Amino acid sequence: MVQMRKRDYIQESKSFDEVADTYDVYRPSYPPELINTIISAAALEPESKLLEIGAGSGKASELFLERGYGLLCIEPGQQLAELGLRKHEGKRIEYAVTRFEDWQQPRLENDLVFSAQAFHWVPQPEGYRKCSEVLKPDGRLALFWNFYLCGDTKEDRELASICGEHQVFSFASEDEINQRIDRTSAEIPASGYFAAPEVYRYQWSTVLDADSFIGFLQTGSEYLILTEQERSRAVAEISAVIAKNGGQVSFHFVTGLFISAKLVTP
């Protein structure tokens, strides 16, 4: 049995910068209709001020940039920020290389603050407080995550079991995802800075070969803290399962989106 590790979440959050190029290639994007929902809910105009927390190399950023919006991205990883600037050269994008909670002299009066797959790395309640401070009175906070749903085939369950056993990745059941969505829905108003959110779910899937699946694992904090020997054992077993399944595996997502108005005190 693999012993559970004590986790340092702040240190783990720094690990993404060490695999910036891999992260950019193998991390999944987000459903386009999710962006449509945010644009509508926040009533964004072409010159609206958008602020992104934990932008990485710009996986979510590009979905706004390609629609002509400008972004100020907060990203603590220097290599990820440099990659994002190169990748989106010519677009209206800036980076502040810092953790959101440490950001000095933050830009105020933003129409939208959003975070994709990153807000759980921000200490609370400081994160919600600062989001409220940098938003306009009628601004919106949008938080979204891809949750990784375990499929219902024998191969899906076997792959999830191996990933869990080696602590390289965690798939979730539909009930577990719903519980996570409910917790976040309750956490946002409990902060005291935002109203109860509008919640949206988007279910989608993609097909990956073994190299792509392993590449995705290499971008995760759970995988990155393993020893080389632990990684090798996990990769060998995972590759064998995917090979038995014709060299491909279906990857299922539930993307949860939370959009909330700030509470304005008199």
Image (cartoon, rainbow, N blue to C red):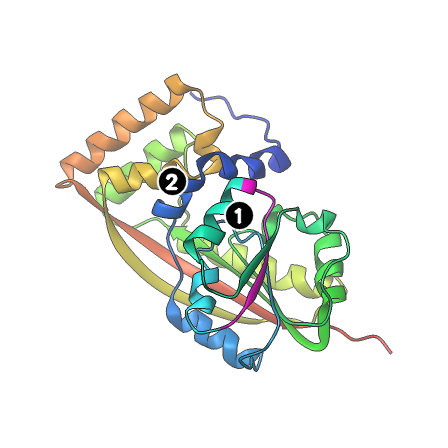
* Image disc number at residue 157: none
Tell me, yes or no, whether the highlighted magenta stretch contains residue 73: yes
> Which amino acid type corresponds to the residue marked 2 in the rendered image?
Thr
Name the outermost residue toward the top: 229
Residue 125 seen in the current view: no
**186 up-or-down from 170: above or below:** below
Name the outermost residue toward the left: 246
Q: Residue at x 48, y 70 (%)?
A: 200
Q: Tell me the crowding category of disc 2: few under 14, some 14 to 19, or many 20 or more residues within 10 angstroms, Cα based.
A: some
The residue that disc 2 covers is 22
* Image disc number at residue 81: 1
Q: Residue at x 35, y 46 (%)?
A: 25
Q: Position of residue 183 (x, y in %)?
A: 60, 57
Tell me, yes or no, whether the highlighted magenta stretch contains residue 15: no
Judge left or right: residue 2 versus residue 119.
Answer: left
- Give the magenta-colored segment's residue range: 69-78
> Which amino acid type corresponds to the residue marked 1 in the rendered image?
Ala
- SS of the residue at dot 1? helix
Q: Tell me the crowding category of disc 1: few under 14, some 14 to 19, or many 20 or more residues within 10 angstroms, Cα based.
A: many
**Which residue is at the front of the view, 89 or 251?**
89
Judge left or right: residue 36 versus residue 45.
Answer: left
Q: Position of residue 218 (x, y in %)?
A: 39, 35
- SS of the residue at dot 2? helix
